[in-house]
Image (cartoon, rainbow, N blue to C red):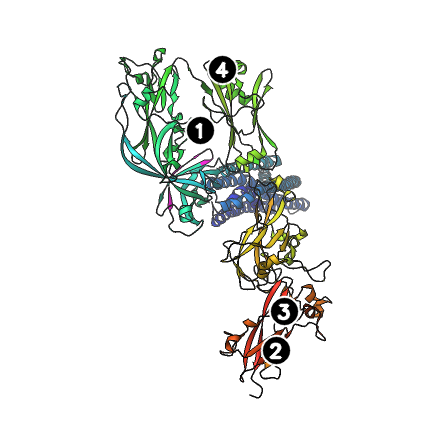
Amino acid sequence: MNKKYLSVALFGALMMVSTGVFTSCKDYDDDIDGLEQKYTDLNTELSAQKTSLEKALSDVQADADAAQVAADAAKAAADAAKTEADKAVAEAAAAKALAEKAANDAKAEAIKEAKAYIDELMKNVATDEELSVLSGKIDGIQSDLNTMKEDLKGLGVDLNAEVEARAKADQALQVQIDALKKFEEATGKEFDSLQGQLDAMKKELANLGSKEEIENLLKKANEEMQKEVSDQLNTLLGVLSTRLNSLVFKPAFYYQGIEAMGAYSYNYNILTVGKINADGDFKTDAPKVGITTSMTPGLVAEYHMNPSVADWKKITKLTYISADKDYKTRANGVVEAVVDNFQGDKGILTVNSHLVNGTVKDIEQDGKVTVLALEAHYNNGKQDTIITSDYAAIKAVNAHNLVLALSQPFEQKETVHLYKTAAEAINAAATYEISWNSEGEDLSKLINTHFDEIVDPEDPSKDDHKKLDKYAFDKTSEGYGFKYSYELVGYHVGDNKTSESAHAALKDAIFRPQMPKDGLQQGFGAEQNKAEKGREPLVRITLTDIKSNKIAAVGYLKFKIVDTITESDVVLTPNFDFADVYTVNCTEDKKELKLTWHQFEEQIIAQLEKQGISKEDFHDNFTLDGGVNDATQYDGILATSKAVTTKYGVVSQSIQDDGGNETQILKWVVKNNQAYQVFKNKESMKAIVRYTKVIDAVKGINQYVYVTLNWTPSKRNVTPAGTVADADKNRAYWYAKNDPKAGTGYSDIHANVETVGQAGADDEFKSDILNTFMGNDVTVTGIDAVYTAFTDAKLAKTFTFVDPQGTALTPVTGNSGQKYDITVGNNGKTLYANKVGATLVKYPVVTINGSVLEYNADNATNEWAKDILNYADHNELADKQTFTAKIQINAANCDYVPFTLSNNTFFAKFLRPVSVADPHETNFLDGETGGSKAMLKLTFTDWRDHNFDNTAVTKGENYYKYYGIKSISCLEDQIRTDMNSTSGDFKDLLSAASKKIKFNFVEPTETEIQNGKGTIAHYFGELVYENNNTTVGDFQIKVPFDVEYDWGTIRVYVICKIAATVAN
């Protein structure tokens, strides 16, 4: 009982340790041995106490015998009491041991051990394999805790028994005391010692404690143990929830349909600039252009972390697996990527690396694509877990013309570059206005860097203008090897002795208007005054190559300090994010994304009030552009942003009463199909709407509040998929690849003509694919339950031919020896043949009509199809023998959403309907009068190996007539002989070997073939051999015959043996 209780108490820790990560089996053996030793020691101690008590009673009994032999009745009573006392003491001692060990060990040892083990757990997170075992066992902890409760309940029963035993012991002792009192009357003082010993025994029993005390102790131990285990389990779950499970590449772009990242090389002229300050006169400041250089910073790749809250800091090392994958042709040389650093933020892991060795392959030039997969070595402890991302392609990109620009206009497909000299900026109107009392403008949010990607080195007009980063402040540029710096450029206007730029200060990228002192710039944060108005400070911004510390680009940005903004101003640009799951469903169903009133209050109204714009002012004076039912959507968040031509959904406004106050709220409704067109390639979509307050209608000055609604689904279900399970195929109709035996696999099906003798059969070559599937229907399984629009019942299944080009399925050979190239057309429904090496003329061979395969050899224009069909016998199934087509099963609900179907291709082999052979001997004797004659004997079988003359299988059917055996003709000019070579080597035409030997064939009629001639059931014609030359010895001839039937012509060769001339 004690050991069982301890095992349950330690269960939570043991389950976690059992995966093999934290403690070895030997450690457990040592722990168990220790516990058993403690148990043994305690039992030894209790046994010693019991022996001592028994000895004391024995001594008392001896004294009683010596003192009063005559007191038999009293002595008997004392003996009985002693016996009961011994029993009670033993039971009480056992109960005491049980209670003490259960309580103390459970409380002290079990919890101590559990805590130690789980502390070890926190140092060593389990591996994937171990966690998979652990996850299956965690659910069992509660059940084992329940078991522990039952054990404790059982312990309570044992305690009840112990209390009852103690009560019996009390009664027995009382009997003994009473007996001893009588005994004392006879023995006198001898009983004083006995009474003292008995009192001590009773006191010993009392020290065991009451039943209630023991139960309370056990209850407390149980609660503490459960709390300890629960706390550690919660800690464990916390660890698991932040454990990195997978990495998914976030493509920067798509390289010919492949998710890709760019390996950029930036080419620029090295620029040098002079020293400047805010007080001097540097109006002619401009960078000097130096030599051209190139910087290749390497790669910047982003990966989605799963879960998004994963602790990326536990990644101890990142490495890349690299490979060159065939795209068209073969090439050599694999580039390697070395990780420089990485950073995690909001579920995205950004990895900076550089390339060494090899070259980045180009699909168009090399026929290969270089790919990388990221390996994350996670939590480098006893068991280092390696997590591998999906593969991503690398595209080598050359860039030049680095230039600083305004960040926001580029969002509108505009290009507004900064001025390249101080003079240009000074002589132009200020780019931005800033109020004299502004607390500062962050320049890093106003600028970014553009470059031209070289598409065709020979044609600069094809350069693709792109941006290096969205804003300077996001530090994306540093991942590409560049950094920004900001300086005020002092210059004087007219007779002013104080520089324009002395009226401002910079702190990093923060630009702040302020007053100079004694004509000189003061430190950042100095006094502001309206006297600053009209001043136009100038800022020089440089982009520096971090590796070489060379300047790659310089730009100038001028501000004008004003009292109030005189141009339209954007006062607020809140963003609202939605993470609702998206699932494509092939409908116009609408998804409603709605702001709550408190979101509108907190992120719009409250923020405007901080700028002095009240809630009433907003409600009364700001109107939603385009109207409250279908707001205009914009391409950016600038005062100059333009309305988009294609909206994403409909944004509308409504009024919600939040309890005495009315609040405007926005609702965004997007149709499922439109969302799919975005989410199939992008992670998010957004709609930007604008509230406008007219400040000066005549001058066109307004205040704007842009609201950006972003929908980034937490999960994009845009790739419905399923499989065609082999279990859905009727095994009896399927064959392993090129195997003639049915039921051997699921690679091939066999297509054949209609079976003779069946109702309506007329030798048509039509074969229904669905007959090979269970229930005569294709069932798609393995579809994720989330795709309710793509259940099997809603999927339309179709069959199409797979293009055979580039495979062993083309070219093919016909019975005539002609080779044909096979192509697919008619939306995958027809295979065509054209003669190899001839002018392109295509004729259909086989068509899929619904689910029915129809072989097109039923009219005069399909002689090529017949030729192809009759090339090989029906049991000659290897590649390049029986005509074979590859077929694909397609499944779809709506044509614009691809449904990925696996295990959905197979091969159809088109069996030749009839085979003709010559297994007989055809013999002639040279020199016979009138020539030597022989009946042509051929054996006809169909695609089932049914012999046309075997009545056991034909069952009264005329197979010759059913299959339309029309004629048998001899190609006499192609007869060959071995008479001038070794036997069986038919290298010479008979006509070339001898002009005197004649071989004639009397052709049968169609009626004679099908219905016979005279006593011959089926007559195939007669061979006549004549020799008008000299005598000859034995030789052979090989005679070709063409047998024409419904499905074309079969060529069969008959070997004829010519015996030597009669009597020679």
Q: Secondary structure at mark 4?
A: strand
The residue that mark 1 highlights is 411
Q: Residue at x 53, y 45 (%)?
A: 132
Whole-angstrom CA distance, mark 1 to mark 2, is 93 Å
Q: Is residue 653 above or below residue 466?
A: above
Residue placed most toward the observer, 935 or 131: 935
Whole-angstrom CA distance, mark 3 to mark 4, is 98 Å
Earlier-in-chain disc, 3 versus 4: 4
The residue that mark 4 highlights is 694
Q: Which residue is at the far bottom?
A: 1063
Q: Are the residues tagged 3 and 1 within 8 Å (C-beta)? A: no
Q: Position of residue 97 (x, y in %)?
A: 57, 43
Q: Tell me, yes or no, whether the highlighted magenta stretch contains residue 1051.
A: no
Look at the image and give the residue range highlighted in magenta.
334-348
Residue placed most toward the observer, 675 or 32: 675
As shown in the figure, which amino acid type bears the numbered disc 1? Glu
Q: Is residue 312 above or below residue 928?
A: above
Q: Secondary structure at mark 1?
A: helix
The residue that mark 2 highlights is 1024
